[in-house]
Amino acid sequence: MGSSNLFLSFSLSKLILLLALLTPTISAANSNHFTEYIGASFNGVAFTDVPINPNVDFHFILAFAIDYTGGSSPAPTNGQFNIFWDSNNLSPSAVAAIKQSNPNVKVAVSLGGATVSGQPVNFSPTSVDSWVSNAVSSLTSIIQQYNLDGIDVDYENFQSDPSTFTQCIGQLITTLKQNGVISFASIAPFDNSDVQTHYQALWASFGSVIDYVNFQFYAYGPSTTVDQYLSHYNDQTANYNGGTILASFTTDNSPNSLSADTGLSACESLHAEGSLPGIFIWSADDSKSEGFTYETQAQALLTS
C-alpha cells in the first residue's frame, strides 16, 4: 500500500508539471502602461505638448532611426543607423527635461518604419554578423547621446528571410540589454503575411527579451467593428503567446485605418474584461492639432 501511494503521488506530480508546461501563459491583465509615438511628421510637436498622467507608466517612442543614408535618394547602410525624427524639437536636452519633470516617463527609439523620403524602408542586411556589429555600435551611440531607455522594432518591408531577420534583431536586443544600454524592447508588427512571418519567427526564438508587442491594430481598416477588434486582439495574443500585447489606435484620421473612437471603445471593452495590458497611440504628431483628446482619455482609462 505504501509503495502504491508513493507511485500515485509521483505520477500526479509529473502530470501536474506536464500540464503546467503545456498551459499557455496568459499575461493579459489591466495595467497602467501607455506609449506614444512622436517625431515622424516634423510638425513641431514637443514632448511638453503631450498630456502626461502622473499615474501611468508612460513611454515616448521617437520615430525613427533608420539604417539608411539621408538625402533625396536614401540607400541602406547595413545597420549603421541615422536619426530621422524631428531632432530639433526632440533633442537630447528635451529628452532630459521631460524625464526630469516626469519621473514616470521613459523614452525609446523606433527602428525602421515604412518609408524614408517616400521610398520603402527595406530590411536588407549584408550579413547577420556585420549588421549586428554595426547596429550595436551606431545605436549605442544614439541611445547614449539622447539618454534613451529602449528600442522598438518597426521594419515593415523585407529583403531578407525570416531567419536572418530573427538573428539580426534578436542578437541586437540581447546585446543591448546585456550591455546595459537599454532596459526594454518592443516590436510593432501588423496583420500582413510577410510581416507576421518575420515577427512571429523572431518571437519564437527571442520572445523572452521582448517586453512589449505594439501591434498595429488600426491597420485592419476603417470598417472594423469593436467586436472584430476584440477578435483580432485574441488572435494576436495567440500569435505572440505570453507577450504583453498593447491595444492601439491612430489619430491620423486616415481613410485606410479604423477610427480612434473604435480603437478607444475596444480598449474600454478590454479594460472592462480585465484584459488591457496597455495602449499605444500613433501619434503625437497627428494628435497635436486636436488637443490630444484621445491621449487624455486613454490615460484616464488606464488609471481607472
Image: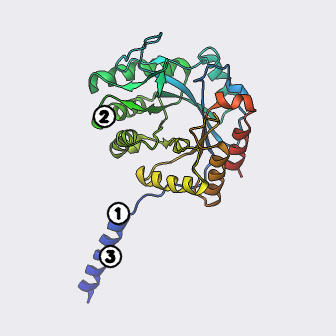
The answer to whether the residue labelled 3 contacts the one labelled 1, judged by CB atoms less than 8 Å apart, is no
Residue wearing tag 3: 12
Q: Where residue 160 sits: x, y (%)?
A: 30, 30
Q: In percent of the image, x 62 and y 47: which residue is there?
A: 263
Residue wearing tag 1: 22
Left or right, 153 with reference to 63 = left
Which label's residue is closer to the chain start, 3 or 2? Answer: 3
Q: Amino acid at mark 1?
A: Leu
Q: Amino acid at mark 3?
A: Leu
Which label's residue is closer to the chain start, 2 or 1? Answer: 1
Residue wearing tag 2: 167
Q: Please tell me whether residue 264 is drawn above or below residue 154 in the rendered image.
A: below
- Marks 3 and 1, Cα distance to the nearest angstrom? 15 Å
Q: In percent of the image, x 49 and y 20: which residue is there?
A: 118
Render colour scheme: rainbow
Residue 20 seen in the current view: yes
Front position in the image: 13 or 98: 98
Which label's residue is closer to the chain start, 3 or 1? Answer: 3
Tell me the tag on residue 67: none
